Amino acid sequence: MKVIKDKWFYYQLCVGILIISTLFSVYLYHMIMQKWLRNIDYPFSPILFQGQFFSFFTYQSNFLLGVWFLASAWTFNKPQYWWKNQYTRIAITSYISVTCLTFMGFLLPTMLINKVVNVGGLLVGLFFHLITPIFMIIYLFMHQEKITMTPRQYFKKVFLLYLIYPVLYTVYLSFRFGMYLNDPLLGDIPYDIVFPYALLTSKGGVWNIIGSAFDLVFSFIIVFIIAYVLFILVNIMYFFIIKAINKRQKV
């Protein structure tokens, strides 16, 4: 077996293992201790917990990031794979950056205001929302390739593909959201279990608008408007920053 001496191989491998193992540890801890991801006064259900855990964009985007790092390490000497090109790296970085911005700009301040933070939860939150995005941002800017597309070409050929994942995530949560509103059997399940961003709508939260189906739908729409604005702006920002760096390096 040929020994790879490039430090970035070990960076990819170690970061990938760290992210996946931490995700698995968090999942296993909650399953063994039978604890919801938030302090919810409702009997723990392993089945319902699967839906709650995998509904969080934080865990989904970190899982995607961990798999990407491991796949990149596995194919380190084979750069032709599509998931290793510049545009895919920008997309992955954008997803995890939205995770970071949402947490640091809104969710963390909300948690601090409502005093619902514990030390362990804060450390895990900072790892998945701040440390892992930094890992990817460093990798992105240390592995730049020349962007040959014009902005118009990028929006026609790449940008819409980038939005597929956020759209699929929206469809998935919309399905869960619709079940909660329309199935009488789910009427007694706390909203925090069904919708991962219940801090925005739960009683005692910032807006405190829960109480009717209209309020829930309104809050759902607002959350995703904010999310899509971030998805769009962050991706465009990375594209133009790297484009500008390419231009400066050429000069």
Image (cartoon, grey):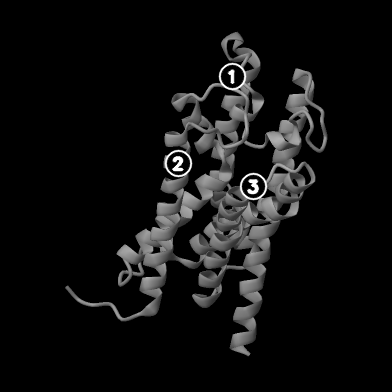
Residue 80, x across and y down, in percent: 35, 67
Q: Is residue 104 left or right of residue 178?
A: right
Residue type marked 1:
Met
Q: Hey, what amino acid is under mark 2?
A: Tyr
Q: Quadrant of the N terminus?
A: bottom left
Reading the image, the residue beneath label 2 is 29
Q: Earlier in the sequence, mark 2 or mark 3?
A: 2
Please name the residue shown 75% across and 43% down the image.
115
Q: Nearer the viewer, residue 142 or 121?
A: 121
Amino acid type of the residue tagged 3 in the rendering: Asn
Q: Can you identify the residue that label 1 sits on?
A: 179
Q: Position of residue 210 (x, y in %)?
A: 78, 25
Q: Nearer the viewer, mark 3 or mark 1?
A: 3
Task: Name above or below for residue 79 compared with residue 167.
Answer: below
Along the viewing direction, whichever of 76 and 87 lies nearer the viewer: 76
Secondary structure under badge 1?
A: helix
| Furthest-top residue in this view | 184
Using a 10 Å C-alpha cutoff, classify the residue at mark 2 as few (fewer than 14 neighbours), some (14 to 19) or many (20 or more): few
Q: Quadrant of residue 15?
A: bottom left
- What's the CA distance linking mark 2 and mark 1? 28 Å
Label 2 with label 3: CB-CB less than 8 Å = no
Report x, y in % for residue 169: 56, 38
Cα separation between marks 3 and 1: 31 Å
Q: Secondary structure at mark 3?
A: loop
User: What's the mark number on residue 170?
Assistant: none
Kindly identify which residue carries mark 3: 118
Q: Earlier in the sequence, mark 3 or mark 1?
A: 3
Residue at 38% from the left image edge and 59% from the top image edge: 17
Gap in Å between the C-alphas at discs 2 and 3? 16 Å
Q: Earlier in the sequence, mark 2 or mark 1?
A: 2
Residue found farthest to the left: 1
